[in-house]
Image: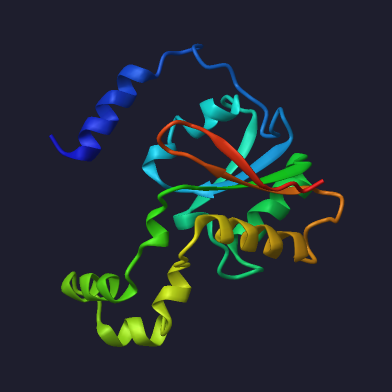
């Protein structure tokens, strides 16, 4: 059985008519989280924050980094604020983030080994480390990302943007930036 087949099989058993009442698109708690895609956060970060399905908008990418100040993260936050009633933003980085230790040259080599043309890498992402959002310190990355979001002319000044660090081992949160 393939991975996809096992997922579809599980889903068939999971779905029960009427078991999951429809929820509104707007988050109940009116906030958005921008965090990392790290698998250790799945079904752990939400529990540690006391949120459940339907409570918050969650945006994820590798290292919770913002590369383009007008790109997908800000676009998603603008949509959440202006169409879905989001009133606060939490940028949540985490300890032991893989993006803090990424080796761009190693990534490039792996890309080439998997058939990506070196010319494509050079022309599309000449600075692979910058494009990937590599950083050395998760706390500094959170501070930087909060600053980018806060300074965006597309984010209203009355929307607090907070920065936190999460421990993927025990669930502990530390406030890095209080956005009020």
Q: Give the residue at x 52% y 17%.
A: 20
Q: Residue at x 26, y 84 (%)?
A: 118
> x, y percentage for residue 99?
41, 60
Q: Nearer the viewer, residue 39 or 18?
A: 39
Task: In the displayed orientation, state which residue is furthest to the right.
Answer: 158
Residue 65 position within the rendered picture, expressed as x and y whole percent measured from the top left: 54, 60
Name above or below for residue 76 compared with residue 151. above
* Left or right: residue 51 compared with residue 60: right
- What residue sits 25% from the left and 81% below the top? 117
Where, by quadrant of the figure, is residue 145 drawn?
A: bottom right
Closest to the observer, 72 or 159: 159
Give the position of the N terminus as an image quadrant. Answer: top left
Q: Is residue 178 above or below residue 15?
A: below
Position above or below: 16 against 152: above
Q: Position of residue 110 (x, y in %)?
A: 21, 70
The percent position of residue 121, horizontal first and vertical second, equals 34, 81
Please tell me in which quadrant of the rendered image residue 48 appears. top right
User: On the picture, is 98 further left or further right than 137?
Assistant: left
Q: For this view, does 44 lie left or right of residue 59?
A: left
Q: How many marks?
A: 0
User: In the figure, is residue 74 to the left or right of 20?
Assistant: right
Quarter of the image for residue 68 reads bottom right
| Color scheme of the displayed model | rainbow
In percent of the image, x 69 and y 33: which residue is there?
Answer: 27
- Above or below residue 176? Residue 125 is below
């Amino acid at each position: 059985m393939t991975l996809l087949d096992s997922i579809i099989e599980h889903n068939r058993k999971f779905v029960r008519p009427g078991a999951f009442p429809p929820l509104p698109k707007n988050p109940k708690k009116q906030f958005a989280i921008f965090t990392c895609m790290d698998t250790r956060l799945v079904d752990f970060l939400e529990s540690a924050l006391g949120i459940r399905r339907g409570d918050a908008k969650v945006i994820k990418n590798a290292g919770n980094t913002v590369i383009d100040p007008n790109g997908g993260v800000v676009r998603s936050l603008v949509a959440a604020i202006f169409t879905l009633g989001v009133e606060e933003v939490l940028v949540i980085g985490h300890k032991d983030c893989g993006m803090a230790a990424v080796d761009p040259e190693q990534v490039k080599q792996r890309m080439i080994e998997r058939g990506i043309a070196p010319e494509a890498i050079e022309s599309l992402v000449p600075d692979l480390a910058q494009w990937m959002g590599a950083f050395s310190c998760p706390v500094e990355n959170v501070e930087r990302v909060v600053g980018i979001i806060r300074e965006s002319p597309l984010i209203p000044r009355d929307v607090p943007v907070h920065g936190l660090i999460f421990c993927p081992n025990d669930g502990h949160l530390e406030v890095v930036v209080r956005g009020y």
